[in-house]
């Protein structure tokens, strides 16, 4: 609940290199993520949007975990690892909420690497 009530890394990066918006049509969650990379390492990653408590908390936890990691390490992040970081049991429908930020991250990295 702490990550929902006081999310870390929520906002915008003025000099972000890439931004992506993802949504979960089942519940209406929409989040945007921005990324800044320096020498293959995630210097900054932030999120914003309108989403449920699970998505906000997962976004906060994920962005905290990613700072300082290499893109290679970030690409290996799995849904199971994110759920473990989240630390709560979720129903099947809420797992989709928790994995929305991971989907955004994967798209961010693909777009960054392809120069979009």
Image: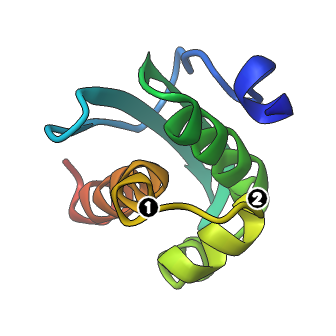
Is label 2 in contact with label 1 (beta carbons under 8 Å)?
no
> Between disc 2 and disc 1, whose residue precedes?
2
Among the 4 quarters of the image, the one containing residue 81: bottom right
Find residue 27 and name its label.
none
Q: Secondary structure at mark 2?
A: helix
Q: Residue at x 50, y 39 (%)?
A: 55
Question: Viewed as shown, does residue 61 lie left or right of 113?
Answer: right
Who is closer to the viewer here, 26 or 49? Answer: 26
Question: Viewed as shown, does residue 64 lie left or right of 101?
Answer: right
Q: How many numbered markers are drawn?
A: 2
The relative height of residue 33 versus residue 12 in the rendered view (above or below) is below
Q: Residue at x 14, y 38 (%)?
A: 25
* Quadrant of image for the N terminus: top right
The relative height of residue 2 versus residue 50 in the rendered view (above or below) is below
The residue at the far front in this view is 91
The residue at the far right in this view is 2
Residue at label 1?
A: 95
Residue 70 seen in render: no
Q: Secondary structure at mark 1?
A: helix
Judged by depth in the image, the label closer to the viewer, 2 or 1, is 1
The relative height of residue 115 versus residue 113 in the rendered view (above or below) is above
Q: Give percent across and percent down for residue 78.
A: 51, 80
Among the 4 quarters of the image, the one containing residue 77: bottom right
Residue 52 seen in render: yes
Q: Residue at x 41, y 48 (%)?
A: 97
Q: Residues within 10 Å of mark 2 (few under 14, many from 20)?
A: some
Q: Give percent across and percent down for residue 71.
A: 55, 71
Q: Residue at x 66, y 39 (%)?
A: 57
Residue at label 2?
A: 65
């Amino acid at each position: 609940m702490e990550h929902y009530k006081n999310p870390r890394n929520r906002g915008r990066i003025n000099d972000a290199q890439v931004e992506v918006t993802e949504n979960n049509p089942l519940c209406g969650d929409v989040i945007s993520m921005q990324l800044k990379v320096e020498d293959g390492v995630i210097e900054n990653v932030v999120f914003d949007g309108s989403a449920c408590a699970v998505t906000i908390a997962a976004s906060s936890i994920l962005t905290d975990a990613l700072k300082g990691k290499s893109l290679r390490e970030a690409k290996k992040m799995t849904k199971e690892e994110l759920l473990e970081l989240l630390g709560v049991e979720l129903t099947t429908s809420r797992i989709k909420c928790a994995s929305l930020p991971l989907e955004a991250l994967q798209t961010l990295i693909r777009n960054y690497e392809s120069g979009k």
